[in-house]
Image: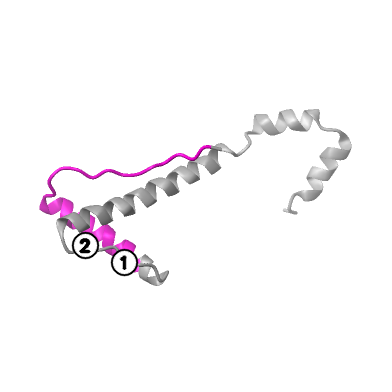
Amino acid sequence: MATAVIAATVGGVLDQDDKRAMTMIVNAANVRRASESLALLPMSTNVELRDSYKVVQSELLVAAHADYIKQSNVATLADIRARWDAATDVQRNAALAELPVV
C-alpha cells in the first residue's frame, strides 16, 4: 500500500499577528509534548518559530488525513444491506451474535 506524504508549508514574512498565533499554537503543542516526555519545539527565532509551527500543522494534517481514511472505510448502509441480502441465515446469525446487546 502506498503512503501519502502530507506536510504544511509556511512562507512569507511573519507579521505580529502571525507570530502571536504561531506562538500560541506552538506553546500548546509544547505543553502536550512535555506531558508526553517529548522534545519541546524551539521558538526563539522567527525561523525556529516558523519551523516549529510547520511541525505542529503537519501533525494536524496527518491526523486529519488518518481520520478521513477511517471515515472512508466505514461501510454504508447500502453496503451492509447488499452483504446482508447475499448472506446465508447462518452468516446472518453469526453476524448478529457479534453485535453488542443494546
Question: For the residue labelled by badge 1, is the local secondary structure a helix, a strand or a loop?
Answer: loop
Q: Residue drawn at (65%, 33%), measured in percent from left and top?
A: 77
Would you say 36 lies left or right of 95 here?
A: left
Q: Position of residue 13 (x, y in %)?
A: 12, 46
Relative image position of residue 56 (x, y in whole percent)? 33, 54
Q: Quadrant of the N terminus?
A: top right
14 or 92, nearer to the observer: 14
Splitting the image into 4 quarters, where does residue 31 fall? bottom left
| Labels in figure, total | 2
**Mark 1 Cα shell of 10 Å, populated few (<14), some (14-19), many (≥20):** some
Q: Tell me which segment is drawn in magenta.
A: 2-31
User: How far apart are the alpha carbons under marks 1 and 2?
Assistant: 9 Å
Camera-side residue of 52 and 99: 52
Q: Of the numbered discs in the image, which one, if any, rests on residue 60?
A: none
Q: Quadrant location of residue 4? A: top left
Q: Is residue 10 left or right of residue 6?
A: left
Residue 43's mark? Answer: 2
Q: Depth check: 2 or 89 in front?
A: 2
Q: Which amino acid does label 2 sit on?
A: Met
Queried whether the magenta region covers residue 12, the answer comes back as: yes
Crowdedness near tag 2: few (<14), some (14–19) or many (≥20) residues, C-alpha within 10 Å: some
Residue at 32 percent across and 50 percent down: it is 57
For badge 1, the amino acid type reads Leu
Q: Within the magenta stretch, is there residue 27?
A: yes
Question: Which residue occupies the extreme front position in the image?
Answer: 2
Question: What residue sits right under mark 1 in the picture?
Answer: 40
Where residue 67 appears, as percent x and y from the top left, is 49, 45
31 versus 14 height, above or below: below
Left/right of residue 53 with respect to residue 74 in the rendered view: left
Q: Residue 34's spot in the image, x, y percent?
A: 36, 70
